């Protein structure tokens, strides 16, 4: 955290019941370098559908950070591959790296945790009567925290005096997904080795055969191959379109059943 917007920190902390009986889930987003509190928003749940608009407004106002550090809870992480969640996938598409702390390690986000203790003591005891009233309290406290309150870790300066917006603007339209072009070369080793391809079965010639001519039916098409241990497959087909080819007739890639 050696510059503004290098790392933002985010967390849900300490849900509490309001005077009207509804629960409030405060989502906070801060700049790790300057301690600038970018958002303190009371929500009704921790789901991505409520959290993403909060981040979108922060990005529109302050630009994009390099990373966002969070814990492993909802909506920041899941049990899926790479612990990615819909929210963190959206960050990745914006060019922001999710930075997850280790499980049960709040000290890895220590600056954010310290801010939460102050927010809880000064904003929620006692809680306000409604979400609207509680949000007004959050907004008033955030303005004071950023612009008026000196921080010892900043040599008694304020977070607002240390912070500068990111030079990376928020794109209101995500760039299109681009997938690498994949080209299959050579034969494919699958369950077809046992004779099953795309729902059809055909016996595969033995590797020791010196010459053979066979016809293998795959799907709705037919591959005619003159196989030889030395020459390989002639890679000519007849009949309907093959599942690995773009048109009927002409040379193809290796047949699934060719050795």
Image: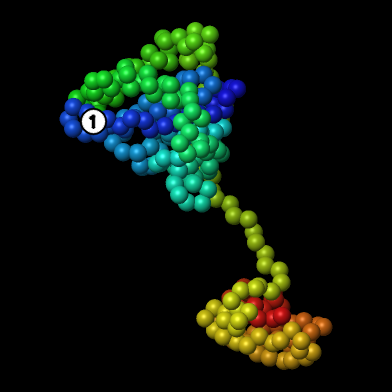
The reply, left or right, for residue 110 in relation to residue 239 is: left
Is 45 above or below relative to 110? below
Task: Tell me the SS state at disc 1.
Answer: strand
Q: How is the image coloured?
A: rainbow
Residue under the point 47% across and 51% down = 80
| Spot occupied by residue 11 in the image (x, y as percentages of width and height) | 42, 32
Residue 253 lies in quadrant: bottom right
The reply, left or right, for residue 72 in relation to residue 213 is: left
From the image, tell me which residue sits under label 1: 17
| Spot occupied by residue 64 in the image (x, y as percentages of width and height) | 52, 31
* Farthest-out residue, top: 156
Q: How many marks?
A: 1
The one of 117 and 250 positioned closer to us in this rendering: 117
Is 158 above or below relative to 123? above
Decide if residue 241 is in sight here.
Answer: no
| Spot occupied by residue 27 in the image (x, y as percentages of width and height) | 37, 31
Residue under the point 81% across and 83% down = 231
| Spot occupied by residue 225 in the image (x, y as percentages of width and height) | 70, 86
Is 36 above or below relative to 255? above
Decide if residue 164 is in sight here.
Answer: yes
Q: Quadrant of the N terminus?
A: top right
Mark 1 residue crowding within 10 angstroms, few (<14) / some (14–19) / many (20+):
some
Is 125 above or below relative to 186? above
Residue under the point 54% across and 26% down = 5
* Farthest-out residue, left: 20
Residue under the point 40% across and 41% down = 74
Residue 42 lies in quadrant: top left
């Amino acid at each position: 955290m050696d510059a503004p917007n290098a790392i933002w920190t985010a967390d849900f902390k300490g849900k509490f019941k309001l005077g009207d009986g509804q629960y409030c889930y405060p989502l906070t987003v801060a700049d790790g370098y300057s301690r600038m509190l970018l958002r303190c928003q009371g929500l009704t749940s921790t789901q991505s559908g409520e959290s993403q608009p909060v981040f979108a407004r922060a990005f529109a106002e302050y630009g994009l950070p390099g990373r966002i550090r969070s814990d492993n809870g909802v909506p920041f992480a899941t049990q899926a591959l790479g612990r990615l969640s819909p929210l963190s996938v959206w960050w990745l598409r914006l060019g922001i790296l999710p930075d997850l702390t280790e499980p049960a390690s709040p000290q890895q986000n220590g600056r954010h945790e310290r801010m939460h203790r102050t927010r809880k003591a000064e904003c929620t005891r006692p809680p306000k009567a409604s979400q609207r009233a509680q949000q007004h309290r959050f907004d008033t406290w955030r303005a004071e925290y950023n612009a008026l309150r000196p921080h010892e870790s900043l040599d008694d300066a304020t977070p607002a005096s240390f912070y500068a917006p990111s030079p990376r603007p928020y794109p209101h339209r995500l760039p299109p997904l681009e997938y690498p072009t994949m080209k299959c070369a050579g034969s494919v080793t699958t369950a077809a080795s046992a004779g099953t391809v795309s729902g059809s079965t055909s016996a595969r010639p033995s590797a020791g055969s010196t010459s053979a001519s066979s016809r293998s039916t795959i799907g709705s098409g037919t591959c005619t191959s003159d196989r030889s241990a030395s020459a390989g497959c002639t890679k000519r087909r007849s009949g309907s379109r093959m599942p690995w080819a773009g048109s009927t007739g002409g040379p193809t890639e290796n047949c699934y059943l060719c050795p």
